Image (cartoon, grey):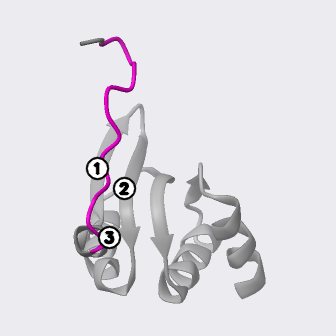
Amino acid sequence: MKSAGTLLAWVSLPKLWLREFSLRIDKNVYQGTTTVFLIGRFDLEHLEELKTQLRSCQSETILDLNEVTIVDVDVIRFLVTCEAGGAKIVHCARYIREWMLRER
């Protein structure tokens, strides 16, 4: 059995499980900046929780979308609003950024 980053097996997950995977929100506050890491599928049902998390931020806010897999139009519109309000959006997929540009 190998380790150190070597792929040992490919696991195929059932489609039902993939649809149920939802958003994970992690926050990191460092030197006056709050980075909010979003992980997974991000859609309308997650917006209220994210808004609650963002209201508690008392510093510059960065939304890191590196591990976001799927978004919907409500999320795109929310991200456009966040960016217009001063939040930085980093590491987002090209399709998300292009969609945001079209929604402006």
Which label sits in the foreground, 2 or 3?
A: 2
Q: Give the vertical position of 37 relative to 101 (above or below).
A: above
Image disc number at residue 26: 1
Kindly indicate whether the residue at mark 2 contacts the one at mark 1 (C-beta within 8 angstroms). Answer: yes
Upstream in sequence: badge 2 or badge 3: 2
Upstream in sequence: badge 1 or badge 2: 1
- To which residue does mark 2 refer? 39
Residue nearest the viewer, comparing 4 with 91: 4
Which segment did they paint magenta?
3-15
Name the quarter where the N terminus is drawn.
top left
Residue nearest the viewer, comparing 99 with 26: 99
**Left or right of residue 99: residue 76:** left
Principal secondary structure, stretch drawn in magenta? loop
**Residue 50: x %, y % from top left:** 32, 70
Could one spot residue 104 in this view of the protein? no
- To which residue does mark 3 refer? 50
**Left or right of residue 3: residue 103:** right
Amino acid, disc 1: Asp
